[in-house]
Structure formats: structure tokens, C-alpha cells
Image (spheres, rainbow, N blue to C red):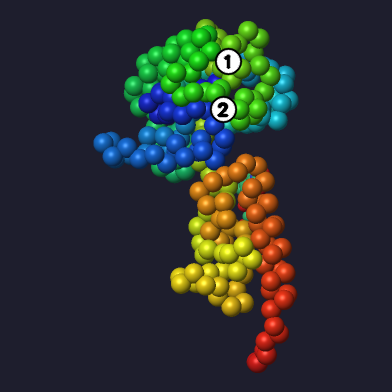
Amino acid sequence: MVQVNKYGRRVVNEKMAYSDRARIHGVYDPNRREYPNLLLFMLYDDAVARSDSAHVMRHPIPMPGEDADYVITGDTWEDLAANVDGRLATLAGHVAGTRLDPSFVPNLVATVARFDELARSGVDLDFGRGEAPIGRAWHGPIREGSPNPTMAPFAEAGPYHCIILGAATLDTNGGPVIDAGARVLGVDGTPIPGLYGAGNCIASPAGEGYWGPGATIGLGITFGHLAGLGAAAEPVKPFDL
Ligand SMILES: Cc1cc2nc3c(=O)[nH]c(=O)nc-3n(C[C@H](O)[C@H](O)[C@H](O)COP(=O)(O)OP(=O)(O)OC[C@H]3O[C@@H](n4cnc5c(N)ncnc54)[C@H](O)[C@@H]3O)c2cc1C
């Protein structure tokens, strides 16, 4: 599997944790005045499509025989590109009018040839795929004989398949800052009396970091609990209608 942009080029280590991988979608190219990776095209061959592995990391590739209209298929790279571009035309209002560039197919052929060469050598000189432990851990069954467990050369003949990928929001990281007791801090850095926060409505205690699955809900529950304890311990205030 590779992920390429509308120019048919790989732009990211596909096996990065999703919170990091997704950032590539937002890269702006000031020369072309566009977001070239707004959509990425996840391409795989029929050996992947026909695999009967139900590994949790299989998603979004459907099981064989499963109906999934988001999978686009073509007998050759040319056919596949035409079908993907046709699908993009029907999605224009949702994909900011993105279409495949005319250079997509020739670039893709070169991209796949390069990827196959790197897969055979076992070293992704371009994006370091398979170097980080998380990339290897979040991976399905290994193709027999692959020196790099996260890479394998593409089948020489189609059919080939594509799933269009766009970025989405998992959680937010901005908002008022809280202290260790979940008290919301004012601009002077001191707690605002009686005001608590947790979860997505505050600046994440993890800052720019994403510590892995559960970090967002875990912090939400932890600081929500602290906020509840703090609020319950507040002195009772007179409530005047
Ligand atoms: C697809 C997906 C997968 C995820 N997987 C994981 C995971 O595996 N592990 C993990 O830790 N995190 C995961 N997250 C992130 C996690 O789910 C969120 O960070 C977390 O649920 C945020 O909780 P929250 O209570 O702060 O906000 P929310 O759950 O967004 O709650 C806010 C609530 O406020 C309500 N609301 C909004 N405006 C108003 C209003 N004006 N008045 C009244 N109510 C209002 C909303 O309807 C909502 O119910 C995932 C998120 C997504 C989208």
C-alpha cells in the first residue's frame, strides 16, 4: 500500500501514527498556491484486497466480498486513475474541487517502481517507513519474505484499488489553560474562582503531544474528575433569582 497525492507522489510515511500522518494533509504549497495533499489516494493491489486477515489494522480495507462503495478499482493504473478522477468529479462539493493532475499516472508509475525497489531492499530511504516501533506494531500480517515488515512490492498486474483519504478532527487542543486542579486560569495565570474545565473545551494538558490511544479521553476523564472534586468543594454561594 502506498498513499500518493494528486500528482501521484508519496509525501509521507504511511505507517506514522494517525495524529502525525494526518498533518501532511494540511501542508500548503505557496508556489502553486494550493494544498497538494488535501486528499491522499491510498492504493493497494489485489493481494491486499483478497487477504482474509481480519487484523484490527485492516480498516478501511474491506474484507473480501464485503460491499464498500468507497473502494475504487481499475484493471490498470490508467483505468484506476480515470475511475478515481471520475469519483472526484462527483464529490466536487466535498473535496474543494480536487482532481487528479495530468501528471498523476506517469508519476505514479515511477512512484510504484521506486517503492517496489525500496520494499525489496527493506529500507524506505524516502520516508523511513517501518523504522519506528509504532509503524511495525500497527500493522497486519507480514507478507512472506519481506525484509521490511511494513513494505512489499506491488503485483505487476492489476486490478488495483484506491481509497480516497481526507483529514478529520479527532479532538481539539486549544482553549483556556487549566492548572493541575482543573481550575481555569485567567490571562494573569491565576485561577478564575469557581471555573473549571476538562476535555476538548480547554487547552490540552498534553500540549502539542499526542501520547497515543486513550490520551484524549484519559485526560478528559482525569481532569473532569478533578474538576468535579474541586467544584464540589467550592463554598456554597447564595443564589438569588
Ligand atoms: C472517530 C474518533 C475516534 C476517537 N478515538 C479515541 C480513542 O480511541 N481514544 C481516545 O482517548 N480518544 C479518542 N477520540 C477523541 C475523544 O473521543 C474526544 O477527545 C473526547 O470524546 C472529547 O470529550 P469531551 O467531553 O471533551 O467533548 P465531546 O465528547 O465533544 O462533548 C461535548 C458535548 O457538548 C455538547 N455541546 C456542544 N455545544 C453545546 C452547547 N452549546 N450546549 C450544550 N451542549 C453542547 C456536544 O453535543 C457534546 O455532547 C476519538 C474521537 C473521534 C472523533
What residue appears at the point 66 percent right and 16 percent down from the top-left corner?
142
For residue 148, the mark is 1
Is residue 215 positioned above or below 16 on the image? below
Q: Marks 1/2: CA distance?
A: 12 Å
Q: Decide if residue 198 is on the left or right side of residue 38.
A: right
Of the numbered discs in the image, which one, if any, rests on residue 175? none
- Classify mark 2: residues with Cα within 10 Å, few (<14), some (14-19) or many (20+): few
Q: Which residue is mark 2?
A: 132
Q: Is mark 2 within 8 Å of ligand 1?
A: no
Q: Considering only vertical position in the picture, is 132 above or below 24?
A: above
Quadrant in which the N terminus is drawn: top right
In this orientation, does residue 85 appear? Answer: no
Name the quadrant containing residue 53.
Answer: top right
Question: As rendered, which of 164 and 134 lies closer to the eye?
Answer: 134
Q: Could you say where residue 45 lies in the image, as x and y percent from the top left? A: 57, 16
Residue 230: percent from left, percent from top = 69, 71
Name the amino acid, label 2.
Answer: Ala
Question: Of helix, strand and loop, which one carries label 1?
Answer: loop
Q: Which x, y percent locates residue 89?
A: 43, 34
Amino acid type assigned to the residue bearing label 1 in the image: Asn
Q: Which of the 4 image quarters holds residue 220?
A: bottom right
Q: In the image, what residue occupies the spot 60% across and 43% down?
A: 211
- Which residue is the extreme one toward the left? 31
